[in-house]
Image (cartoon, grey):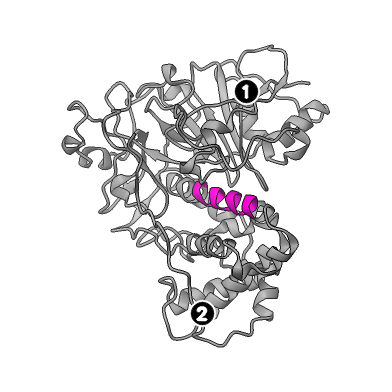
Amino acid sequence: MDLLILIVIFSSALLFGQGGHSDFPAPLMGAPKDAADLHDPVTELVRKIDQGKVKLEFDEDRGYLPSILRELHLPLSSQMLVFSKTSLQHKYINPQTPRAIFFNDNTYAGFVPDGSLMELSAVDPKRGAIFYTLDQSKGSKPRLVRNEDCVQCHATPATLGVPGHLVRSVFTRTDGAVAMRAKSFLTDHRSQIDDRWGGWYVTGTLERDLHMGNAFLRDADDPGNFDRKPGTAIKELGGRFHDDRYLSNHSDAVALMVLEHQAYLHNLLARLHYDARQLDADELANLDASPLAAQIEEVLRYILFAEEAPLKGKIAGSSKFAAEFETRGPRDKKGRSLRQFDLKTRMFRYPCSYLIYSEAMSALPKPVKQRIYNRLAEILSVRGSVVLRLKPADRLAIAEILRDTHPEFAAAWQGLSLPANRVKMIPASNVQHSVDDSR
């Protein structure tokens, strides 16, 4: 083998779970016992390296980071910086040397300048998140090591009981330590901006929203004295950290919003995969009588941004992330895409997740997929009423985009027979706009 990758337990303020809990119930899904069962991008890279098709190059200043970004197609513009001490390598992380995170639709990499490891994570289409580290020592003998205990910290109720990612917002002291007595938040697109990005650097501009980024809790553990205004007003990070040790000085606000959205949706899809595998053929053929029906409705609500927290004003990132993100993915005959941003009152111009094209969606059992696309077609076909806060113009645009770009949805739309105004949604359960994650 040509690469040392360790599947390990580690915790994070961003997306690599949160370790250190011993009282969680056993996870729904355990670690895979055979690497042949895995098809996530990092495992695929390992196979290419083992076969001699790829060779990682070592950079004297940043180790394997540039090579990893290139091979895993992680854009430089996706860089986000975390200064809270909430990672496996917490002793190296502080406001002067934050951890840099890079990501795309299904893969993540974490880098700390003085750290001995790179942290990597990728989404397997059927199993959810798979976690790795890469030794940053030049000339280290490559060796693949697996640890079946890793999901004990990465498959908790916070990740819906399956191997998953989560994004946290924490009150952080001036040295990067987390204020343990103060509450923290699990965040996604349903969270108010006020509760987001504690422990992160954030670059970009927000017209009216305040956030927790770029700021510190200076008075013991009392969040009542935390001031969001100075951190929100920051447009550039000059002088706040040793930016010469990083590939970029950006920690883009729009990239953070995208990360929050996709991390939780991948967890929802991983749980749906797991629960669908517990059903026999007869149960899959009668999903109306299955608990999966409610899960599918939950997935649809999230995909369609039903409980998205509205933005108070325009948000603009500081890097090329938004422009580069919009270039990826299919477009319909009118040139529209689900990756186009709004960033004035909501995140996306067309409120339907780009992850509807993901491998995690494609890999769902056929009866589950058919129900998702049939229900989605029903929801988007409704005339003269508001369903999931979708305006008629949005429903029409989303339907047209998907009919041109998604064959399975197009087939469901073609076979639609439900009369208009007959669609009923299962009420949302335990909707969490911003979850108190205090311990």
First along the sequence among labels 2 and 1: 1
Amino acid tagged 1: Leu
User: Based on the displayed image, in which of its 4 quarters is residue 68 positioned?
Assistant: top right
Q: In this view, does 298 lie to the left or right of 28?
A: left
**Residues rendered magenta in the picture:** 263-275
**Pointer 1: what residue?**
134
Element on which disc 1 rests: strand
Q: Position of residue 126 (x, y in %)?
A: 67, 47
Does residue 111 appear in the picture of this structure?
A: yes
Q: Mark 2 points at which residue?
A: 423
Amino acid on which disc 2 is placed: Val
Q: Using a 10 Å C-alpha cutoff, classify the residue at mark 1 as few (fewer than 14 neighbours), some (14 to 19) or many (20 or more).
A: many
Query: What percent of the width, then of the height, locates residue 67?
Result: 65, 28
Looking at the picture, does residue 25 appear above or below residue 311? above
Mark 2: which secondary structure?
loop
Most foreground residue, 257 or 287 = 287
Which is nearer the eye, 169 or 321? 169
